[in-house]
Amino acid sequence: MLGGPFLDRNWMGQNEDYASADVVMLGLPFDGTVSYRSGSRFAPEQIRLASWGLEDYSPRFDKHLQEVNFHDAGDLEFPLGNTLKSLDLIEKNVEEIYKDGKRVFAVGGEHLVTLPEIKAISKFYKDLAVVHFDAHTDLREEYLGEEMSHSAVIRHISKIIGAENIKQIGIRSGTKEEWQFMKKHNTLIHEYCELDVLKNKKVFVTVDLDVLDPSVMSGTGTPESGGIQFNELMGWFEYLRKFDIAGADAVELAPDYDASGVSTAVACKVIRELLMVM
């Protein structure tokens, strides 16, 4: 009988036992509606491998990954070319996680995967809010005639939880109509204290990694100059520790556009630190 040791392909610091875990990491390798550069479906696998280059201890949060008590369930398998069935698979699996009294931490994949997550979680929490980090508004009704697009994910989510329960950070690109929507509903914020209206709600945090400047995160499908720096993002995470985090995801890494591997390493650290907030 082989004695090993063998390489682990799951996230480091995970609890191998699903039943006793509090948080479930779920890989969502889907990028069927990407409007510019595809490839984010390869992110969950590459992020897992790169996670072993991190320490399991966060000095910022003075916490080990093991204290998060998360289980890495692996990647869902999607039928290529079938967006609606893929979204349905996500919704059903996330719903099972919450039926089991746990919370999800999803790793995309493109940003549309957040929609079925919210559909599932909203069945359990009637006071759900979303904190949205992104370079792009994602508030279109449709893109090139397609409603199910990563460019429309937050608009669709607003129809589920209400625009008043969405706060957006880092946005710097979108149509005039989308900017008017943000202004009308006061979704775009710039100061930590503007999150305080969500203090008594369950908060889902969605991080489109292109919120970071391309000098930090070049490996994404839609890089947009003028973004925030890593430590700015961490400042927001620190403030979010005060909130009741019901779930989270990190999406839109397209690892093959950064051959250096730096973008993947950055994504890993973003995920590690966001796990600490949970």
Image (cartoon, rainbow, N blue to C red):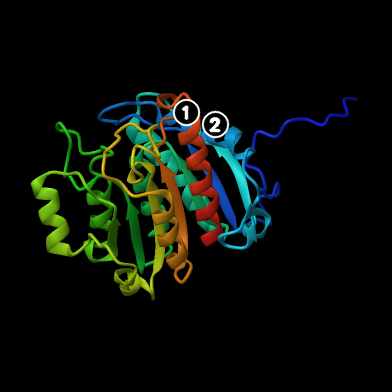
Residues under numbered marks 1 and 2 in contact, where contact means CB atoms less than 8 Å apart = yes
Q: Amino acid at mark 1?
A: Phe
- Judge whether residue 278 can be spotted in this image: no
Three-letter amino acid code at disc 2? Glu
Closer to the camera in the image, 137 or 160: 137
**Identity of the residue drawn at 38% across and 37% down:** 252
State the image coordinates of residue 52 (x, y, percent, origin top left).
64, 38
**Residue 138, x across and y down, in percent:** 24, 45
Q: Secondary structure at mark 2?
A: helix
Query: Within 10 Å of the Cα at label 2, are there few (<14), some (14-19), or many (20+) other Cα atoms?
Result: many
Please tell me which residue is depicted at 34% across the width and 63% down the height of the picture: 129
- Judge from the rendering whether residue 12 lies leftward or rightward of residue 170; answer left or right: right
The percent coordinates of residue 169 (x first, y second) are: 30, 56
Disc number placed over residue 114 in the picture, else none: none
Residue matched to label 1: 42
**According to the image, label 2 marks what residue?**
45
> Element under label 1?
helix
